[in-house]
């Protein structure tokens, strides 16, 4: 082999190693989330129970089966979906806005969904009603941000869009504050506060279908467009000159990323940082090519969410809200990213 | 097939910065857009490749109206080499050149072996295949310009349009890049580039359009256009001409 041929080979090997680590994060997250808890399950019991579930035979202890399949199963599935959704949406937004510091919250999706959900709690809707409102709020916020962004014509539409997101987001935040102020302080306010901080504790098997549908549609869409995200990340003019139908793709990517963000906010509340930090971790593993970053972000996001959620339910006698844990982990990483800005976001 | 702008009025947004511009580019020729900064060279360039719609007039390519073609159809005919920049993400050189294949791939498709082959061929043609695995953000300015040229080649267009292709390059790299631009025209592509350096137009171009204040004040073969009188009028400054048996050069006096 010549020396020239070895360079791409070595890189392919590094990429494979990166994907192996991403898969490992996901499987380790699954194992830890299913085994660790008030009723500990040994890895052997876990394998027996899963084998019994999928072959239909009997195996493992019935208690372990109940814990794994009925108690922890739905929560773990929801965790994987929420983590993967936020991470993939964050990766897409960072490419689209050519800014490695944006996240799914940037277009107001999270704050819009949050306002919808606290309104649902305020009007004492059932969970389904709350989810619908959260969803509607998230989509409405993004549409509003997008309309404001396109109404103001400048030479830097991306910056205007991001600033519109910040402004609309803070208005929605004020709306959340107003609803909390008006809420019944004994029944409603604690529910709102807990929900706004993010949690998978209340996830039931019935929540999985409304979560899985939108997340699957949006994630598959973003996955299918991942090869075009490279050219999109060069900016509007260069992307058009390369033959990308930018207008259509921008709308498609924003719609898909908002869909998955709203769905996860509706089920799990507001969980920050995952959508910001995981894209960077996945770039560190498999490089900046979106064809690889998008799937790697899904794997790492799902796995990381499970580790954090396991911590949330086991680290203290009471549940720790997820938003607090992700912020505690995410803030130092964010500061490190800021300090690393000069290095060109490898 | 020609790329042609007729009676163009050009400008960003509502502001018109140039009027009554006629320009034509044929296959196999290199043409320079020369003039002082702020004269509308880059705006004209972007209008000719469909990035900015003209305020009046029409851009046609092979007899078809440019604005009626899709971005993909345009990109298969014209490649754009922007001024070198450092992107947000540290893509590998190979990934950057592979993006030149976008117009040849279906919307949801991943790059085919043919796309990879065209990418490799473009890198080889410019002699930069050894850079393939390097990060685009970490190579030198001259190398970056060659990578963008390779990307334009991978696009397999009929015309290549370059914005200040040698701006910010050191002397040695200027020579290398101008040589490669000449080679593009010799290979049959129509090449149009902006520059504010008459010597560069002299080295690369067969024809020149002189632009000033949004107007095309003169155009024609280089030897007719690049005279002291014309350049002094365009730049509004005294200019010195050095002549020798081996060629001519212009210096600001």
Image: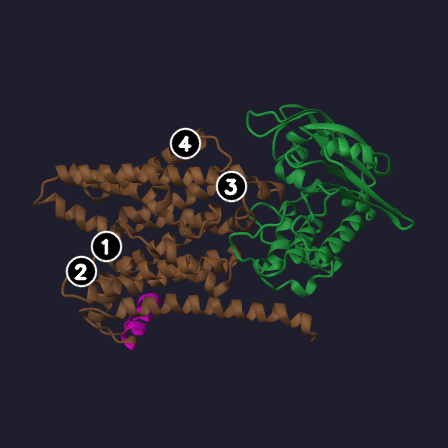
Does the CB distance between marks 2 and 1 fall below 8 Å? yes
Circle 2 residue: A319
Does the CB distance between marks 2 and 3 fall below 8 Å? no
Circle 3 residue: A249
Whether residue A52 appears in magenta in the rendering, the answer is yes
**Mark found first going from the N terminus, 3 or 1:** 1
Give me the chain that's brown.
A
Circle 4 residue: A147
* Chain of the residue that carries numbered disc 2 in the rendered image: A
Find the distance from the CA under tag 4 to the CA under tag 3: 17 Å
Q: Residue at x 86, y 34 (%)?
A: B224
**Mark found first going from the N terminus, 2 or 3:** 3
- Please identify the quadrant where the N terminus of chain A is shown: bottom right
- Rate crowding at label 3 as few (under 14), some (14 to 19) or many (20 or more) other CA atoms within 10 Å: some
The image quadrant of residue A339 is: bottom left
Whether residue A235 appears in magenta in the rendering, the answer is no
Find the distance from the CA under tag 2 to the CA under tag 3: 41 Å
Find the distance from the CA under tag 2 to the CA under tag 1: 9 Å
* Chain of the residue that carries numbered disc 4 in the rendered image: A
The image quadrant of residue A245 is: top right
Majority secondary structure of magenta residues = helix
**Mark found first going from the N terminus, 2 or 1:** 1
Q: Specify start and end residues of the magenta stretch as a single range.
A: A44-58
Element under disc 3: helix
Is residue A121 shown to the viewer in this render?
Answer: yes
The one of A234 and A117 positioned closer to us in this rendering: A234
Single out the residue that lies furthest toward the left.
Answer: A186
């Amino acid at each position: 082999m010549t020396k020239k041929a070895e360079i791409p080979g070595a890189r392919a090997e590094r990429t494979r190693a990166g994907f192996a680590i991403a898969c490992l994060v996901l499987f380790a997250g699954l194992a830890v989330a299913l085994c660790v808890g008030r009723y500990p399950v040994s890895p052997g019991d876990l394998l027996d129970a899963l084998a019994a579930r999928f072959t239909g035979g009997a195996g493992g202890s019935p208690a372990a089966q109940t814990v794994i399949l009925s108690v922890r199963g739905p929560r773990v599935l929801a965790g994987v979906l929420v983590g993967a959704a936020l991470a993939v949406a964050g990766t897409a937004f960072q490419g689209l806005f050519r800014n490695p510091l944006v996240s799914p919250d940037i277009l107001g999706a999270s704050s819009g969904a949050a306002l919808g959900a606290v309104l649902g709690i305020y009007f004492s809707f059932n969970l389904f009603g709350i989810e619908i409102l959260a969803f509607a709020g998230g989509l409405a916020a993004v549409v509003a941000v997008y309309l404001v962004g396109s109404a103001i014509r400048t030479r830097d539409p991306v910056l205007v869009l991001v600033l519109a997101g910040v402004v609309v987001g803070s208005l929605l935040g004020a709306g959340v504050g107003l609803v909390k102020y008006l809420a019944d302080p004994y029944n409603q306010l604690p529910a709102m506060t807990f929900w706004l901080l993010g949690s998978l504790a209340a996830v039931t098997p019935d929540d999985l279908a409304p979560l899985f549908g939108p997340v699957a549609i949006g994630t598959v869409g973003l996955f299918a467009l991942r090869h075009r995200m490279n050219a999109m990340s060069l900016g509007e003019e260069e992307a058009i000159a390369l033959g990308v139908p930018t207008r259509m793709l921008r709308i498609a990517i924003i719609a898909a990323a908002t869909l998955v963000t709203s769905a996860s906010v509706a089920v799990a509340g507001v969980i920050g940082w995952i959508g910001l930090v995981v894209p960077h971790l996945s770039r560190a593993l498999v490089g900046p090519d979106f064809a690889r970053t998008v799937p790697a972000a899904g794997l790492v996001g799902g796995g990381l969410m499970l580790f954090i959620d396991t911590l949330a339910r086991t680290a203290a006698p009471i549940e720790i809200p997820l938003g607090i844990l992700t912020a505690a982990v995410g803030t130092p990483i964010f500061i490190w990213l800021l300090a690393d800005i000069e290095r060109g976001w490898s | 097939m020609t790329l042609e702008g007729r009676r163009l009025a050009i400008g960003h947004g509502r502001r018109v910065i140039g009027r009554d511009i006629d320009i034509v580019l044929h296959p196999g020729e290199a043409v320079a857009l020369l003039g002082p900064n702020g004269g509308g060279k880059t705006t004209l360039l972007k209008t000719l490749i469909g990035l900015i719609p003209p305020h009046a007039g029409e851009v046609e390519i092979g007899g078809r109206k440019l604005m009626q073609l899709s971005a993909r159809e345009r990109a298969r005919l014209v490649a754009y080499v922007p001024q070198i920049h450092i992107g947000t993400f540290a893509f590998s050189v190979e990934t950057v050149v592979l993006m030149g294949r976008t117009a040849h791939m279906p919307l949801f498709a991943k790059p085919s072996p043919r796309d990879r082959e065209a990418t490799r061929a473009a890198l080889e043609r410019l002699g930069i295949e050894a850079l393939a695995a390097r990060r685009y953000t970490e190579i030198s300015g001259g190398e970056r310009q060659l990578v963008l040229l390779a990307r334009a080649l991978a696009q397999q267009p009929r015309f290549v349009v370059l914005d200040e292709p040698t701006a910010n390059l050191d002397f040695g790299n200027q020579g290398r890049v101008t040589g490669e631009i000449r080679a593009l025209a010799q290979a049959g592509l129509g090449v149009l580039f902006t520059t504010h350096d008459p010597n560069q137009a002299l080295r690369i171009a067969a024809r020149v359009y002189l632009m000033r204040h949004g107007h095309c004040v003169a155009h024609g073969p280089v030897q007719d256009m690049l005279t002291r009188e014309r350049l002094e009028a365009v730049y509004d400054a005294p200019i010195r001409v050095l002549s020798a048996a081996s060629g001519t050069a212009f210096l600001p006096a």
